[in-house]
Each structure stands twice: as structure tokens, then as C-alpha cells.
Image (cartoon, rainbow, N blue to C red):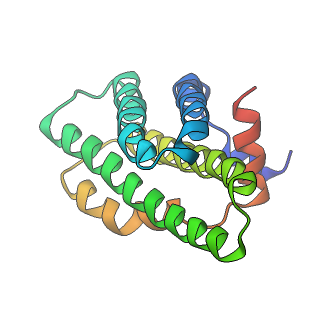
Amino acid sequence: MSKESKKQLLPPKYKDIVVTSLKAVTVLSVPGTFVPFLDEAALPAIWGKMIFDIVERSGKPMSMQMALKLASGVILGLVAHKTAHVIIIKALAWTGAGAVVSLPLNIVIHGLFTYRLGKIMIRDFERDGTTFDDVVRYAVVIIPQLIPVPTPAELHDLSVSFL
């Protein structure tokens, strides 16, 4: 395992939370590929639960600032997800690939965004000094972290997170 891959692994303290969310979005991905707006309706609940569980396990009190951070993380995650999703759907429509390609891509996109959002939330809630300014920072910092093409190490980490 490379040094980059080791650095990316989910902390054991939170791994079960992110893996549970990954399983939920994987299950959602099948009907979500074929039922319009099902993803948009269900993802905020899955991500909100994941983030809430991360906050709870971090031992941080759930203050108004934390609640705002939770809400902004879910909303910004959904915005970033939708942006990437629309780009991919347009590409599939243009190529004519259809459902055969859409289903596995939907699973990968949902899983990758859930994994990335979980890692970002874990990193942020593990550090001290969480402030209201973090909510503003999300708009600038989190969305670019959610959108890029995954690295081989990140895909490896995502796959071993299920183990």
C-alpha cells in the first residue's frame, strides 16, 4: 500500500459510519438511476445522518454553529454531487451509452461523494476551533474537493473501506 493510500484511509473511529452510508447510497443508486429525483430526495437524509453521527462520535457538542455546519455540508455536498451528475448524464446522453453505463456510474458517483464528504467532515470535526467561518469556508473549499476525478489511491481506499 502506498504512502498516499495509507494517508487517505478512513480513521477506524469513524469507518463504520462512512461504510454504512456507502452501503445506503449503493442501494439507493439502483432505483435512483431510473427514478427521476429519487437521488436528490434521499441523499440529504443519508449524508445528514452520516454527518450527525460523525459529529456525535467526535464528542463535539451540537451547538447552533455545529448545526449550521451540518446543514451546509449536506447542502454543498448535494450541489457538488448534482453538478457532477448532470455533466455525466449529459455525456451519456450525447454518447448514447444509456442505462448499462449509467447504473455503475451512479453507484461510483454516489459512493465517491459520500466517501469524500465523510472524510472532509471527519477531518473538520476532529480539529479544534470550529467556528461559524467554517460554514463560509465550505463554499470555497469543500466543493472543489468533491468534484475532481478520483486518484487511483482514492479509488483503492474507497474499495477497501467496504472491507
Pick the front one: 154 or 35: 35
Image check: 114 left or right of 45?
right
- Which residue, as the protein is rendered here, is positioned at the far bottom? 94
| Residue 112 visible to the viewer | yes
Q: Quadrant of residue 142?
A: bottom left
Q: Residue at x 54, y 50 (%)?
A: 113
The structure residue drawn at horizontal position 20% and vertical position 45%, both measured from the top left corner, is 68
Q: Quadrant of residue 69?
A: top left
Q: Residue furthest left?
A: 64
Residue 78 rendering spot, x and y as whole percentages = 39, 53
Left or right of 145? Residue 2 is right
| Quadrant assignment, res 107 | top right
In the rendering, at what x and y percent does residue 133 appear?
21, 58
Q: Is residue 4 visible?
A: no
- Number of residue marks: 0
Q: Residue at x 49, y 44 (%)?
A: 35
In terms of depth relative to the viewer, which is nearer, 13 or 160?
Answer: 160
Tell me where residue 14 appears, x and y as whole percent.
53, 27
Q: Is residue 148 above or below residue 66?
A: below
